[in-house]
Amino acid sequence: MITTTTGETATGHLPSWAEVDPSEQEVPPEELAVRLADINHSLKLPGQVLRAYSPANPTGRPTPVEVLHGSIDCTPYATAPELTTPVVNLLLAGEHWLTDLGPTDLTQLAGGLRALAARLEDDVVPALIEARTEWTTYHPHTAGVRQ
């Protein structure tokens, strides 16, 4: 609930998953609309930590990077009705986001990730093993350098 200094109140549903209660007291009445527009119910979603190279890392070595982390978000007082429904926003890595994902979008993304994982396991890993086998035939001193 948001209450203004003049006693006006605005109430709404606080989802059980929301990490922050946006309730406020003593809000100047002229700021009520802005405060309502700024409400965002959110739940952080963990990602997967991978080791990756980054130009920002001066050592030139791979460092842990969390990918595909994000949040469930709902902006109940958004001007566009479709934005008032909870969506998932995912940070791919760095500054690359997938935003406003609904259930169908998430299902399609999950299918794409499963397909990618299958390609990595079924096609890329065997191709890499074959490439390494061929490589070490001609460069035996590199055998077993990186597993």
Image (cartoon, rainbow, N blue to C red):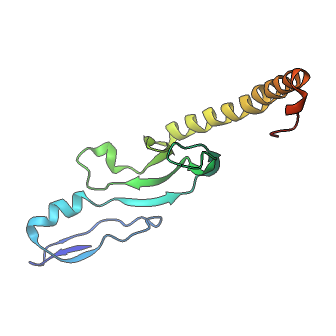
Position of the N terminus by quadrant = bottom left
Q: Position of residue 4 (x, y in %)?
A: 14, 75
What residue do we see at 72% from left, 28% from top?
Answer: 119
- Is 10 left, or right, of 142 in this rendering? left
Q: Position of residue 34 (x, y in %)?
A: 17, 60
Position of the C terminus by quadrant = top right
- Is 132 left, or right, of 38 in this rendering? right
What residue do we see at 88% from left, 25% from top?
Answer: 133
| Picture mark count | 0
Residue 101 shows in the view: no
What residue do we see at 79% from left, 27% from top?
Answer: 128
Answer above or below: position of 79 versus 46.
above
What residue do we see at 57% from left, 56% from top?
Answer: 46
Q: Position of residue 120 (x, y in %)?
A: 73, 31
- Is 104 left, or right, of 51 in this rendering? left
Q: Foreground: 68 or 138?
A: 138
Q: Foreground: 28 or 142?
A: 142
Answer above or below: position of 38 versus 104.
below
Answer above or below: position of 133 versus 110.
above
Q: Foreground: 92 or 83?
A: 92
Residue 88 shows in the view: yes
In terms of image quadrants, where is residue 134?
Answer: top right
In terms of image quadrants, where is residue 137?
Answer: top right
As drawn, which residue projects farthest toward the front? 141
